[in-house]
Each structure stands twice: as structure tokens, then as C-alpha cells.
Image (cartoon, rainbow, N blue to C red):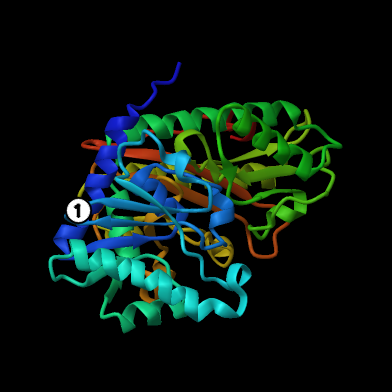
Amino acid sequence: MVEQPNLKRLRRYRLDRVREQLIRRDYAGALLADPLNTRYATDSTNMQVWCTHNAVRYVFVATQGPVVLFDFHGGAHLSEGLGTIDEVRPATSWFYFTVGPRVAERAGVWADEVADLINIYGSGNRRLAVDRCDPVGTHALLARGISIQDGQEVMELARSIKSPDEIAAMRCAIAACQAGMGSMRKALRPGITENELWSVLHAENIARGGEWIETRLLASGPRTNPWFHECSGRVIEKGDLVSFDTDLIGPYGYCADISRCWLCGDGKPTEQQRRLYALAREQIEYNTELVKPGLSFREFSDRAWRLPESCAGNRYSVISHGVGLCDEYPAIYYPQEHIASGYDGVIDEYMTLCVESYIGEVGGSEGVKLEQQLLVNANGTIPLSTFPFEDELFL
């Protein structure tokens, strides 16, 4: 039985984390429209995926004052009893689908509502952290004297350190995910399609109270190299490698981000398949051993396991990344990307990280994707994902 989180305590911790970041930056408050950020701050949900592309829901978090949720029409009852929300109001939508050519007019109404909250609760401070806002809304806020600050920075840093209740919630999501992976492993046989195999994970997640899956990253045979093919109607054949990345949002909205590679059928892997798998396992183990509190992102990048030259051109996008309600800060890049995209910081205790590996030779026929989800503790890491590797078969 997986330990359940104390939701009241979890919600209070997360809202306090947001306000700590706002105080540190001297912001009057935050205006959050990203559904994952509204979830983190309030634990209130409503059509999460739909709201990612329809701006019908947002929350104002005063640094010193109330939390006001603006919810989609008829959704006020969804937040009853949460304890993180002081007031629910109907949202003012102003994107084209809902208001057509009245966008500027309705954006003005929306901006007036936000400005009123700043006037009342900002104590003269007009610096507002905003995580997502289209240009029309941005101009409307600026016209009302509001100084727009980076809300994504606030939220990514707030979300980066997990409480014990968050870890418990994440373990519940991982348990649902790994149950689905077990059912997938049993269902894998020659003749099943990639889509059919992927559907098993979805069904098991939903049955256990999970929410959605962010990608369709499952590929077989020649579609495993290069990586990032999404699952298709291809029929999986005996002897194919099957690689996948769960990207699963499970119970309590937490992410289980685990990758494994399997062999289809009851035969033996080829020497090439064994070699690729052994390299991927070596990379995961080596980089996991590096992770400790106090290690800088740049040090991790510089000291990380080196890909064979034949695989470097097909390398994964990151060596490691944070994980919480989804993939989160930090992103730790290969040295090749560090100059263009990388940034420094420090791995802290109670971060949750995923260590990544993709091994596929440029021009090769197949590739192996592996990933482990970890909790950083004082001594290094504790594995959160425990689904077995296929070492006995491949190594």
C-alpha cells in the first residue's frame, strides 16, 4: 500500500512556497494562467488539458492578501473546501474563440479586474509576476501601470523543492505508472501495434485515478532511432526493441517520467541490441552516482558520462531534469548545448530529478531509451522509480 499525502498540509506548503518567492522579489502578487501553476498554488483543477489552450481560468495570488480564483463558467463549486482559495469569481475570457473581434474590449475588462486587485492589496507595489499572457493582455496591463515580471521564474523555483507530502503524492503517481508498465510488459507480443500497447498505460493510469499522459513516446524496431517518434499503427515484430517514455500525469497531478526498453518476443537480443542497452545502463548508473546536494548544474554537465562519438549526434536533449507536476526546473544539458542553452544553479536536497539516457548510433537501426526518477537526499539519491530493468536479458 502506497502512503497517501496529507493534502491539507501539501496545499499549504505549496502556497507558502509561492509567496516566499514573491516576497524575495518584492512582487505585489502573481497572476497565474498556466494550469500547472494554478494547480500548484491552489490544488484547484478544471479541465486541465483543455485549459492549456483556452485561456478561461486564472488565479491571483496576493503576496499579502487573498487568493482569488477566476474560474470557467459554472466552475465555482469545483474549489469548495480546498482551503487555499479565499474567493472564486467568474473568469473574463478575451481570446478570439470566445469573444471574436471584441478581444481588445474584453481584455480591457480583464485588465481592470487585475488592476483593482493590485490597487487594493499591493500597498502601492505594482510589480506583478505573470506566467502566461498574450500580447493584447500584456499591453492592457501595462496601460494600467502594472509592471509585469517573470512569473515562470517564480513558479519554477517554488516548485523545485518538494515536501514529504509531495513525495508521497509522486510515489502514488509512480505506483500507478508502474502498474501500467507491468500490464504493458505482459501485453507486448508480436502482432500488437504501438498504439495498442500505449493504450494499456493510459487505461491503467485512468483506472487508478491518474489524469493524462503528456506525450506518445513509444516506438518499436527501426522507429526507435532516431528518438522522438511517437507511437503509430506499426505492428511490432518479434525481435524488435520497444522503447518508451511514460510522461504520465498520475494521481494528485504528479508526474511519473520513466523510460524503459524491452525486447518483443521470447527470443534473445542481438549483439548490437545488447551493446546499445549496456551503454544506456552504464550512462544511467554513472550519472545517478554523480547526483548530490551542492553539485552545480555545470559541474554535472562537465563530469557526466561521455557518449560514444557514434551516438553523440543522436543524443537526448538533456542529461537530467527536474520533475514534479510535469517536467520542471532544472534542465541540465550536455556540454555541447551548455553554451547556447545552459544555465548554472545548484542541486538541492529534496529536489526530484530524472536522469536520462538515449543510445542510438547515427544511421543505426535501433535505439535504447532509459530514464530513472530520483529523490535527492543528503547522501545522494533515492530511486523513486523501481520498475526493473531488463539486465538479465540484455547484459
Relative to 276, is 355 on the left or the right? left
Q: How many numbered discs sit on the rendered protein? A: 1
Question: Percent position (x, y) of residue 312?
Answer: 53, 64
Residue 176 left/right relative to 86: right
Q: Amino acid at mark 1?
A: Gly
- In this view, the residue in front, 87 or 391, is 87
Residue at point 43% right, 47% down? 355
**Circle 1 SS class:** loop
Residue 324 location, x and y as percent? 40, 45
The correct choice, above or below, for 257 with respect to 297 in the image is above
Residue for badge 1? 65
Q: Residues within 10 Å of mark 1 (few under 14, many from 20)?
A: some
Is residue 258 among what the camera can see?
yes
Report the side of 348 relative to 227 (left or right): left
Quadrant where the image shows the N terminus: top left
Spot occupied by residue 249 in the image (x, y as percentages of width and height): 52, 42
User: Residue at the location (53% across, 52% down)?
Assistant: 73
Who's the residue at 84% across and 35% down the image? Answer: 190
- Residue 151, image x, y percentages: 32, 64
* Image quadrant in which the C terminus is located: top right
Q: Nearer the viewer, residue 220 or 349?
A: 349
Q: Is residue 270 above or below residue 134?
A: above
